[in-house]
Amino acid sequence: MINTLEEYKKSIKIKYEIEKEGQYFDYLYSPSRGKLRDLCWLIFENEPTQDDLNVFRNLFCLDFDHTKKKQV
């Protein structure tokens, strides 16, 4: 199966529609940069996957440390 950018976008939209009705409704129903930032931090503090931690490290060039919330 060949994945295209359009298929990827469609998959992201489907996942978003599912998730915005779920546990993180408050953050996703009417998202803003601040709400998405807070949601990401909440997920990183409570249930990060190794993939999440790798993305964080790649974006910020440092490992996730919950004590440095004000610095990121």
Image (cartoon, rainbow, N blue to C red):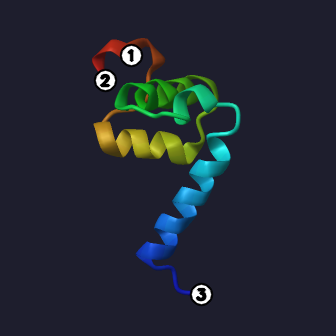
The percent coordinates of residue 8 (x first, y second) are 49, 68
Relative to 54, is 42 above or below?
above
Image quadrant of residue 29? top right
Label 1 sits on residue? 69
Within-10-Å neighbours for mark 2: few <14, some 14–19, many 20+: few
Q: Mark 3 points at which residue?
A: 1
First in sequence: mark 1 vs mark 3:
3
Between 64 and 18, the one nearer to me in the picture:
18
Q: Identify the secondary structure beneath mark 2.
A: loop
Residue at 61% in and 50% down: 17
Neighbor class of circle 1 (other Cα within 10 Å; few <14, some 14-19, many 20+) is few
Give the amino acid type for the residue marked by disc 3 in the picture: Met
Q: Which amino acid does label 2 sit on?
A: Val
Q: Which residue occupies the extreme right position in the image?
A: 22
Q: In this view, does 71 lie to the left or right of 52?
A: left
Which residue is disc 2 drawn over?
72
Residue at horizontal 42%, vertical 46%?
A: 55
Q: Which of marks 1 and 3 is in front?
A: 3
Local secondary structure at mark 3: loop
In the foreground, 58 or 36: 36
